[in-house]
Image (cartoon, grey):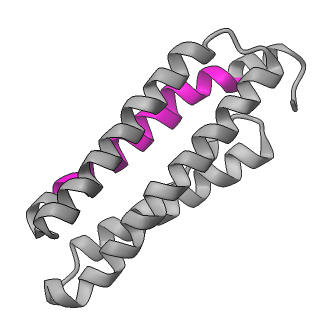
């Protein structure tokens, strides 16, 4: 799922994006797998826990990079991150209360992949353009 044109020009952020794409693609493969739901459930749980933690770390790192380089779109970008982080947390809370429903998990996986592609492919590219306009590597 990762494509080289998703690079923004920060080694840390680019490696985190690659990790996110790898994890989300694996999550989707597991969710759509042929094994019984019970056999796939531990991987689903593990990925959800990873996402809860990793997006917090990644978003903080990305926002810190934006602060360091004086990126003018930081406030808007941080609001987008906050909304998605909230969406992940609400899904995790719903799962904790209601359990893992296969259909809901599939919908969530598709939503996360779509968001990741759109966000990295559009919003994060604005950061990359800014980095290049400032002379390259931050």
Lateral position of residue 101 relative to residue 15, left or right:
left
Identify the residue shown where x is 51% and y is 63%: 22
Lateral position of residue 111 relative to residue 126, left or right:
left
Identify the residue shown where x is 87% and y is 26%: 136
| Front position in the image: 72 or 64 | 64
**Above or below, 60 relative to 48:** above
**Above or below, 137 relative to 44:** above
Stretch of the chain drawn in magenta: 107-128
* Membership of 111 in magenta stretch: yes
Q: Quadrant of the C terminus?
A: top right
Q: Decide if residue 76 is in sight here.
A: yes
What's the magenta bit mostly, secondary-structure-wise?
Answer: helix
Number of callouts = 0
Residue 61, given in percent of the width and then of the height, sits at: 69, 40
Q: Residue furthest front?
A: 97
Identify the residue shown where x is 61% and y is 12%: 73
| Front position in the image: 133 or 74 | 74
Where on the picture, by quarter, is residue 51?
bottom left
Residue 5, given in percent of the width and then of the height, sits at: 61, 39
Residue 44, given in percent of the width and then of the height, sits at: 31, 73
Identify the residue shown where x is 43% and y is 41%: 117
Q: Decide if residue 105 is in sight here.
A: no
Q: Residue furthest top?
A: 72
**Above or below, 100 relative to 119:** below
Lateral position of residue 65 relative to residue 109, left or right:
right
Residue 102, given in percent of the width and then of the height, sits at: 12, 69
**Above or below, 124 relative to 126:** below
| Front position in the image: 53 or 30 | 53
């Amino acid at each position: 799922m990762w494509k080289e044109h998703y690079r923004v020009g920060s080694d840390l952020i680019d490696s985190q994006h690659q990790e996110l794409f790898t994890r989300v693609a694996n999550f989707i493969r597991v969710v759509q797998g042929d094994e019984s739901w019970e056999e796939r459930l531990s991987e689903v749980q593990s990925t959800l826990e990873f996402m809860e933690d990793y997006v917090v770390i990644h978003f903080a790192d990305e926002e810190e990079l934006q602060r360091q380089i004086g990126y003018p779109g930081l406030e808007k970008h941080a609001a987008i991150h906050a909304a998605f982080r909230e969406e992940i947390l609400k899904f995790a809370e719903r799962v904790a209360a209601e359990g893992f429903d296969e259909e809901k998990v599939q919908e969530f996986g598709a939503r996360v992949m779509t968001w990741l592609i759109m966000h990295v492919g559009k919003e994060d590219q604005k950061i990359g353009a800014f980095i290049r306009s400032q002379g390259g590597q931050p």
